[in-house]
Amino acid sequence: MIPRIYVPADSGALALGAEKVARAIEKELKERGVEAKIVRNGSRGAYFLEPMVEVATAEGRVAYGPVKPSDVKGLFDSGFLKGGPHKRWLGAPDKIPFLAKQTRLTFARCGVIDPLSLDSYKSHGGLNGLQKAVAMTPADIVSQVTESGLRGRGGAGFPTGIKWKTVLDTAGDRKYIVCNADEGDSATFADRMIMEGDPFVLIEGMAIAGIATGATKGFVYIRSEYPHAVATMNKAVAIARKAGVLGANVLGSPNTFDMEIRVGAGAYVCGEETSLLNSLEGKRGVVRAKPPLPAIQGLFGKPTVINNVISLASVPIIMDKGAAYYKDFGMGRSRGTIPIQIAGNVKHGGLFETAFGMTLGEIVDEIGGGTASGRPVKAVQVGGPLGAYFPRALFDTPFDYEAFAAKDGLIGHAGITVFDDSADMMKQARFAMEFCAIESCGKCTPCRIGSTRGMEVLDKVAAGIEAEKNLALVTDLCNTMKFGSLCALGGFTPYPVMSSITHFPEDFKPAPARVAAE
Amino acid sequence: MPMQPASTEIASRTAAIIEELKDLEGPLLPILHEIQEEFGHVPQAALPVIADGLNLSRAEVHGVVSFYHDFRGQPAGRHVLKLCQAEACQSMGSEAVAAKVKQLLGIDFHGTTRDGSVTLEPVYCLGLCACSPSAMLDGEVIGRLDDEKIEEIVAEVRS
């Protein structure tokens, strides 16, 4: 058998030099006259080990990382094609503690298989869910998804099955499945990893959604900042179409489902579902008022399922292994697994899929290993730019939709940004307002104008001008934004602002006093 | 600066793009992306052609073009360097990275160097949040920016 060498082509791995490593391996193979196949897999998500090169040996796969191009000669010298010892040797990838501690359901294949090999996808359990779905009635598929307890992984946490049922029950001459892949939240990259590392699972999930609701057309709306994901998804859709996974007869059944990849144009607000629908229609990405719900009047006014990438990519395993299997993981009303993305100033950054229920402290300190800078953790922002900043005092909060809401936070798309003690929380609060001002679609006054006024008032606080009075004004403004905005951009910007003020009051003392205190 | 094509040429190349894509459902964004790919920006002269081709008003087309950060009114420099300025990168010093790049290039965000070699832009998240601070140079992703990498990038765009 020809040896196989896996070098990730995931954006994160590429950003750390995977392309140069792949070329160095190619060159070395040529010079040594050794025959081997280089497979460009996705990433397993342990970014502190990327580029992580793996070799398939008789005893299973052996990983090396992080590999630099200059390591390649040495790797060959130490017989890495047979798993030989080297300073970059990591052993079996699934024994690496960061990966071994995970429960991989949605990301089971990501980083393992060749993302564009349908055979490889099938041999790792791919298409089992769709196979079962084509033999079921739409109502049965919907009830299985409802039963699993799956909730929208984009951030809102709305039960996926209920959304599907509304679309199934709404009459329409045409229905759509729209996948929200406008993953704009800082600290999140789970959607990108799936699209680059296991694109067929998303296609399969969308096809199941189509069969379940009577929709025949799907769109994946991917942000333009993800060119690699766009390229991989386009290739995967073409392969799936050719193989009959998509098309007039899905897997030979009478069901029709096809899909298209669409690219956003740099507007953060298009991650909000109604803005995204407007954008897909070729309009300004302005938020729509609800009702009507997209499930009833969505894309082009037709009944539309709009789900996040991870929600859709979690459906195939639910159909394959059953609702009960998925539901057994998790806690309270948060069932199944959640791909937590550990990011920012952290030693072991990456994607960690696990059942709901781990505490924030376990995730940051034990899994993440604390800060990259080695300084104490001051704050973590959970849920992207619209998520609250949590102090260490709240590290006992379990990762669960309701538990985070009870602490005036949200889990959002499950990204966690770690900050060390050099962070200035007033600056972070100001940035939240600034970001809202840059990205506001302009529909709601509290968001469009309030965000700019918020920046100005916080600048006054920073300059020591009537700090107390101005902080009261910010609080009042946040209240107006929260209740006076249609979508989460204006409505949730108060989370990072207010959590900074509440948990880190020392950072909001007027400048002279702060200097004196140091 | 690169030579700008004459408006009649813009109109005919735009018309060809519209013809190719107009049957898509919701064709405007794909058309605008293709136009930007073709010309390096979305020229004013293309807007009435699009409006006509899709049966929209010029105001509607202008509204869409101006809504999205990606669509440029002017051609960019030969290279486009985007520096992530979102929270995960902030926690790893993206502000200092931006300050250094700006100083080395002598331009601010949204600016283009006088020799037209590079346009510098902020970006809010490249999805490389576990390898911060990050950047994108002409579509290529770069993670864990440090002084050495910054100098390499600056040298590359200047050459």
Image (cartoon, rainbow, N blue to C red):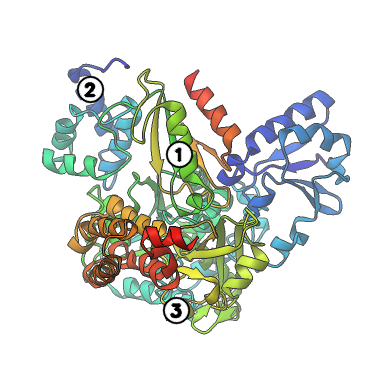
Q: Point out residue A240 in the picture as x, y percentages from the top left corner.
A: 51, 49
Q: How far apart are marks 1 and 3 (CA)?
A: 34 Å
**Protein chain holding label 3:** A
**The label number, if any, that marks residue B10 in the structure image:** 2
| For residue A153, side relative to residue A31 (left or right) | left
Q: How crowded is mark 3: few (under 14 residues within 10 Å), some or many (20 or more)?
A: few
Quarter of the view holding residue A166: bottom left
Judge by depth and name the residue closer to the eye, A139 or A183. Answer: A183
Dot in front, 2 or 1: 1
Q: What residue type is labelled 3?
A: Lys
Compared to residue A166, the image places residue B18 above or below, namely above
Outermost residue to the front: A516
Dots 2 and 1: beta carbons under 8 Å?
no
Residue identifier under label 3: A407
| For residue A507, side relative to residue A103 (left or right) | left
Q: How far apart are marks 2 and 1 (CA)?
A: 35 Å
Q: Is residue A426 visible?
A: yes
Residue identifier under label 1: B98
Q: Are marks 1 and 3 on the same chain?
A: no
Compared to residue B147, the image places residue A112 above or below, namely below
Compared to residue B115, the image places residue A261 above or below, namely below
Quarter of the view holding residue B70: top left
**Protein chain holding label 2:** B
Query: Is tag 2's residue or tag 1's residue first in the polypeptide sequence?
Result: 2
Dot in front, 2 or 3: 3
- For the residue labelled by badge 1, is the local secondary structure a helix, a strand or a loop? helix
Q: Which amino acid does label 1 sit on?
A: Ala
Q: How far apart are marks 2 and 3 (CA)?
A: 56 Å
Q: Point out residue A319 in the picture as x, y percentages from the top left corner.
A: 54, 71
Q: How crowded is mark 2: few (under 14 residues within 10 Å), some or many (20 or more)?
A: many
- For the residue labelled by badge 3, is the local secondary structure a helix, a strand or a loop? loop
